[in-house]
Image: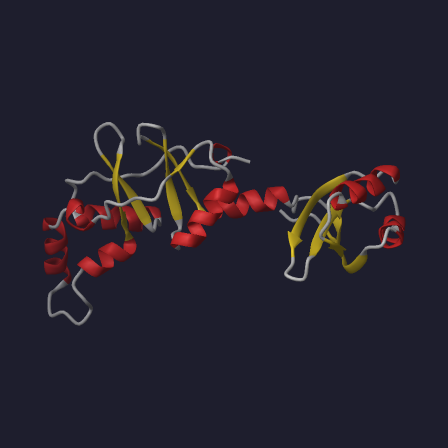
Amino acid sequence: MLVKDFMTPVVITVREDQSMLEARETMRGKNLNSLPVVDDLKRVRGIITAEDIGKASPSDASTLSRYEANYLLGRLKVRDIMSRTVITVEADDTIEYVAYKLYKFKVNALPVVDENNKLVGIISQTDIFRAFVEIMSMDRSCTRITFDATDKVGVVAEVSNLFKEAGINIISIVSRQLEDSTAEVVVRADLREHGMGIIESIREAGYTITSIETYEGVE
């Protein structure tokens, strides 16, 4: 799964010469936490966040009236406080790479740019959550089987073959390496028409099942 499959292609932006008041009202009106700053060619020049605006705004302890505070924000330009170092991704990057960047840099969204640094979209934490939900097929009724296995070559292939022999289609399968040289494997499959015989097949193959849960598809 790639960024271009989940990003929002229409992005709300600001220019460097716009006022901080305009930027603040845009974020408030659209319920956004950040705005890419672009030039006339849509090339990314910076980014401004709600936190940036908060730092530039008079504090609640200030004796300034709301109108005076707005006047000051109206005089201050986006270029004066925007961050010029922008973390970006490209449309052909993978969603796991985006998730890593969002986590590492502790940001809510990343501008998506082309080879000329032109803005082509934006991808957020919510988009990554949506991708995860799709990967795990949470919209489908299924049984979730979790088991431990030695971290060796061929575990996924062997388990997949067990399901194939039983005539059961796997909805999703993921694995995670643990610190003790074992792997935790999670398989989601629809067992309603097949019974639970596959559970015994997995056990007989030498795997330790740690959890069996049945889910109805969620909207």
130 and 201: which one is in front? 201
Q: Is residue 210 left or right of residue 83?
A: right
Q: Is residue 128 left or right of residue 114?
A: right
Q: Is residue 194 left or right of residue 145?
A: right
Q: Residue at x 80, y 45 (%)?
A: 159
Q: Residue at x 86, y 43 (%)?
A: 193
Residue 188 versus residue 210 in the image, above or below: above
Q: Residue at x 34, y 49 (%)?
A: 32
Q: Is residue 165 left or right of residue 186?
A: right
Q: Measuring from the top left, give residue 89's x and y in whole percent.
A: 40, 38
Q: Residue at x 79, y 38 (%)?
A: 169
112 and 130: which one is in front? 112
Residue 29 versus residue 13 in the image, above or below: below
Q: Measuring from the top left, give residue 205's x and y in whole percent.
A: 86, 51
Q: Which residue lies most toward the bottom here? A: 61
Where on the picture, by quarter, is residue 61? bottom left
Q: Quadrant of the N terminus?
A: top right
Q: Is residue 47 visible?
A: yes
Where on the picture, by quarter, is residue 115? top left
